[in-house]
Amino acid sequence: MKTKVIIVGAAGRMGKRFISLAAETGEFDIIGAVEMPGHPDLGKDAGLNAASGRLGVMITDAFQPVHADVAVDFSSPDAIAKTVDFCVKSGISLVSGTTGLSVEQKEKLKKASKTIPILYATNMSVGMNVLFALAGKAASMLGEDYDIEIIEQHHRFKKDAPSGSALTIAENICTETGRDFPDCLIHGRAGKDALRKKGEIGMHAIRAGDITGIHSVIFSCLGESFTFNHTAHSRDTLIRGALRAAKWLVSQKPALYSMADALGLK
């Protein structure tokens, strides 16, 4: 049986690729496509807009009363509240990959997860989520003698910095090592008195060209260094992870899940 899905942010880069790859698998039935009011693609067929063939589903600026299994949200922080409210009211699962959420918006997700299953992830790439797990475990194993620096690179159009994925790496390291997150983060260094302090985690954001996403975690002490590195070749790796998450989530009980849950990394 196909999984019935609503795409939020359906005319964006991620939303269009989700539509294309979901249709390609033959395992999903896209029954809703939502975009922000005033978007130039409103009223277009979601499939044709994503260059994947006609779906007979128009892009709208409001949720329609349809029976879906899950909503997948790749929109913006400003839109997440409406998505959550709709999913709670309709009793459907929610997969959200929207980055840059505030503390209040994350708390709204947590509260809603008492009613519906929600999977929230800053990065849905399978490989990236393995990196999330490994970075925390490595920091714990190495101990306090190893300095930690996180470098993330993205395209020139990315609005938030540092990336949600870089922050997730740092948060996992802090959880495993007892550091205070985000107080231990140092965002770049400048000046004549920028000497590294014990226990801090350096965080550096690069914005250039059309870089899809590169994340590096450097562990270094006096005598050796090693680096975990993940490179996304295209956004498709994120979408394939989201497809996997959506299929998994619809059979789960109400709770707030992560990709680590979906992938069995915990």
Image (cartoon, helix red, strand yellow):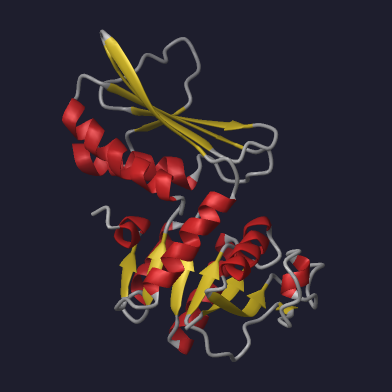
Q: Residue 29 location in percent, x, y?
A: 58, 79
Residue, x 66% and y 31% (percent of image)?
208
Residue under the point 50% across and 14% down? 191
230 with respect to 60 (left or right): left
The residue closer to the viewer here, 101 or 243, is: 243
- Is 99 located above or below residue 95 in the figure? above
Q: Is residue 257 above or below residue 217?
A: below
In this rendering, position of residue 57 left or right of residue 245: right
Instruction: Give the vertical position of 155 relative to 3 (above or below).
Output: above
Residue 117, given in percent of the width and then of the height, sits at: 36, 75
Percent position of residue 6, x then y: 57, 77
Would residue 109 appear left or right of 264 to someone viewing this image? right
Looking at the image, is 71 positioned above or below residue 155? below
Looking at the rendered image, the quarter that the C terminus falls into is bottom left
Task: Give residue 58's position: percent from left, percent from top.
Answer: 74, 80
Question: Would you identify the image quadrant in which residue 16 lies?
Answer: bottom right
Residue at horizontal 55%, vertical 75%? 28
- Depth check: give the residue in front, 124 or 55: 55
Marks counted in the figure total 0
Q: Quadrant of residue 50?
A: bottom right
Kindly tell me whether residue 99 is visible in this rendering: no
> Residue at left 65%, top 38%?
155
Q: From where the camera sits, is residue 62 visible?
A: yes
